[in-house]
């Protein structure tokens, strides 16, 4: 029984101070429910609204991708430097420690391989399994203009409706077919449709011209994919420009885990995303960390 002897009346009501509604600064997210906001705040660092997501979901359609042959060996040393991991439930259960504290962006659609039409996907993970895995967000591929555009938008709607029931946000990933130009007009169309259909954040590609219009026209945060492996300085320049032009972060895979030194590279990308570092300075950081780590190995 509660001890109610000597119970004292509260005194510090600050009657002259109006109640403050806790702020939530993330773009387009102010009207969401508490759980949804709390999960988004695990993906996007509230200190700057930015995120470094490490994308390692490539195996879901292309099998043992270069650099990801052994997720259990390669990825754990990178986790401390990422804000979130984007991966499949198979990789999560088999290869990542449940003691991991970072946000989990769970790939929830799939159903095709590089041998077939890529846009032909289905919802592969139901909401019950996402909850069992303590997913922070659910990722859905959307193929605007693709052969299976309609089905992919249906997948986005189904996953968003299920996530909304439990406060789990949805990441729409804009898949761009080989026949489509990755220009601002296309990316603006694709990202805006995803946001209007209810995605809470959207992954897209960077484009050299007009990216600021793509970002401004999307009412929720955008993160950019890294795309195919580039020389490190170019990858860092792309990340820096994307942030300057309105992206809230990166969801980068191959340009980190396919580097000669993925740990040095994730540090460098982090310095661009969270510390406003220039690409040149971040590249210098990459080279010096890489050299230090080599000399440690050779010592
Ligand atoms: C998109 O189709 C998947 O999420 C990819 O696995 C992811 O976008 C790849 O990231 P990156 O292009 O940086 O390797």
Image (cartoon, rainbow, N blue to C red):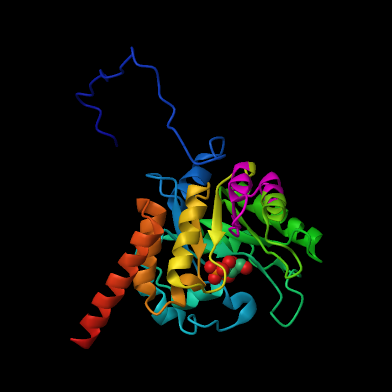
Position in image of residue 229 (x %, y %)? 52, 74
Span colored in magenta: 192-216
| Residue 26 as seen in the image, left or right of residue 3 | right
- For the residue pair 27 and 243, the one nearer the viewer reads as 243
Q: Quadrant of residue 16?
A: top left
Q: Is residue 192 above or below residue 32?
A: below
As for residue 257 lying within the magenta part, the answer is: no
Residue at (52%, 61%) from the top-left corner?
105
| Residue 100 as seen in the image, left or right of residue 153 | left
Q: Is residue 147 above or below residue 4?
A: below
As for residue 194 lying within the magenta part, the answer is: yes
Position in image of residue 248 (x %, y %)? 50, 50
Q: From this viewpoint, which residue is outermost toward the bottom?
A: 298
Position in image of residue 42 (x %, y %)? 43, 52
Residue at (22%, 82%) from the top-left corner?
295
Total marks in image: 0
Ligand 1 is located in which of the four quadrants?
bottom right
Which quadrant is home to the C terminus? bottom left
């Amino acid at each position: 029984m509660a001890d109610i002897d000597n119970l004292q009346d509260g005194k510090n009501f600050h009657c002259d101070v109006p109640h403050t509604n806790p702020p939530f600064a993330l773009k387009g997210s102010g009207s969401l429910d508490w759980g949804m906001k709390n999960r988004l705040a695990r993906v996007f660092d509230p200190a700057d609204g930015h995120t470094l997501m490490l994308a390692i979901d490539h195996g879901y359609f292309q099998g043992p991708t270069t650099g990801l042959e052994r997720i259990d060996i390669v990825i754990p040393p990178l986790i401390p430097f990422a804000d979130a991991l984007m991966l499949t439930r198979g990789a999560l259960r088999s290869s990542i420690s449940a003691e991991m504290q970072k946000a989990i962006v769970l790939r929830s659609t799939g159903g095709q391989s590089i041998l077939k039409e890529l846009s032909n996907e289905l919802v592969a993970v139901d909401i019950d399994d996402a909850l069992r895995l303590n997913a922070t967000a659910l990722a859905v591929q959307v193929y605007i203009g693709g052969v299976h555009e309609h089905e992919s938008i249906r997948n986005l709607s189904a996953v968003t409706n299920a996530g909304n029931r439990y406060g789990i946000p949805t990441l729409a990933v804009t898949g761009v077919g080989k026949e489509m130009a990755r220009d601002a007009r296309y990316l603006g169309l694709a990202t805006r449709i995803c946001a209007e259909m209810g995605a809470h954040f959207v992954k897209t590609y960077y484009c050299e011209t007009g990216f600021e219009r793509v970002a401004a026209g999307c009412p929720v945060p955008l993160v950019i994919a890294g795309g195919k492996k580039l020389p490190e300085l170019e990858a860092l320049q792309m990340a820096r420009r994307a942030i300057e032009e309105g992206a809230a972060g990166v969801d980068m895979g191959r340009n980190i885990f396919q580097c000669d030194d993925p740990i040095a590279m994730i540090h460098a990308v982090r310095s661009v995303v969270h510390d406003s570092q220039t690409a040149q300075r971040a590249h210098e950081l990459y080279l010096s960390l890489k050299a230090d780590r080599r000399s440690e190995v050779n010592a």
